[in-house]
Image (spheres, grey):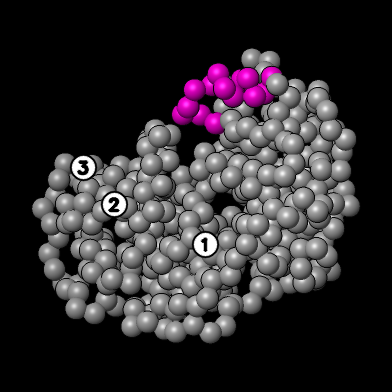
Amino acid sequence: MSFRTLGLDEKILQAVQEAGYTEPTPIQTAAIPPIIAGHDLIGIAQTGTGKTAAFTLPMLTKLAAQPGGPRNSTRVLIIAPTRELVVQIDENVRAYGKHLHLTVATVFGGVGEHPQIRALNSNTDVIIACPGRLIDLMNRRNGNFSGLQFLVLDEADRMLDMGFLPSIRQIVRQMPQKRQTLMFSATLSKEIEQLTHEFQRAPKIVQIGRRANPAETVTQLVYEVPKHLKPALLLHLLRDPQMDMVLVFSRMKHSADRIARNLEFKGIKTATLHSNRSQNQRLKALKDFKSGAVRVLVATDIAARGIDVDGISHVVNYDFPMHVEDYVHRIGRTGRANAIGDAISFVTNEDHGELRALERFIGRGIVRKRAEGFDYNAAGPAQTESSRDDERRPRQQRPQPRGHGHSSPQRPTMSVGAQQGGQRSSAGRSYGQRSFRPR
């Protein structure tokens, strides 16, 4: 199937072709026609399968069909949980709408607000925003959404989670009732799905693959290791030259900084990405990681939601995630667009409960592996004051998985097949031909 069969505007098709994309992904094939037809929609698909283009392309097609001239309102509002994801969506909108006369702006914290206020008050066609800064500016009577046509919640599972739900409700209350509302995510529990009824009218549900199923092109491995040996094990694994672009996940910001300092001390170029970093620092960390200036990027969960970097060879869960959905999002940073990647999880004695919950959630066991040549009986390093503080910090009670839902029998489910072929390396990683598909 080609993009031309989906009913997209000719100028959008031209931009897609110029970007080098040849065929739509399953989520794009399933979601684009109902969005063009005017339906509200919930889109669920694995990370890296092209969800951003699945809502961007049809919206731009509908905007392109409208007469030109001055606007009296913003027409599209896209809300995302992190600055990095806002920037990524902005890049996609500008790329696919390059042949249209559209104005686009971003709104998020960590940078000056005056350009954002000007954008909100000049009836910018497309606003892409984080909820915190947007609410702050709207409360000061900035922005005109009276003629809004599209409201999009990207990473809807996170946006509707406990921390974001009040903010989203506050924003939605100020939007017109007559609009199209689109919600996209890699995971969406039955409990969270019930909340979507507050915001949508008879939404179509497009689900590609099993809910919360990690990408099939990602090889998943568990390394059981004593807690005090996790730094040494990470260094040991990084001796493998195949681990050439590695994303390491830490639960906490100070832990991410400590991991990065340790790697830098050992001569491994490393950057960090978490909410305590300034916006310029976060942008530079991503830029250096993409360019290869740094080999390892250490990130926390919330900051990593917008990481869309081609070529990530390995994701390492240095700290095992507390929530099963976070695991799916973490490992989805590799194996994007049918590329091949490896996901490695360090599991201590304290993590076995979370590991069992994860395996129940994804419906299969994860392969256990031991690192060859690594001394699992080594004594731990001398404690620093920060590490003693970590041990004194109480461990959070293990939560139950936030979602257990499978698709209902009445709804057809499409499966995304793993890419065939590719040669296995000695490190257990496959290399296959990458396909070019809109994200």
CA distance separating discs 2 and 3: 20 Å
The residue wearing badge 3 is: 386
SS label for mark 2: strand
The residue wearing badge 1 is: 332
- Name the residue at 82% across, 43% down: 64
The residue wearing badge 2 is: 270
Kind of residue sitting beneath label 1: Gly
CA distance separating discs 1 and 2: 21 Å
Magenta residues, start to end: 108-121
Say which quadrant the C terminus sits in.
bottom right
Left or right of residue 316: residue 110? right
- Name the residue at 83% across, 28% down: 69
Quarter of the image holding residue 170?
top right
Proximity of marks 1 and 2: CB atoms separated by less than 8 Å? no
Q: Is residue 117 above or below residue 8?
A: above
Chain-order first, disc 1 or disc 3 = 1
**Percent position of residue 283, x then y:** 43, 41
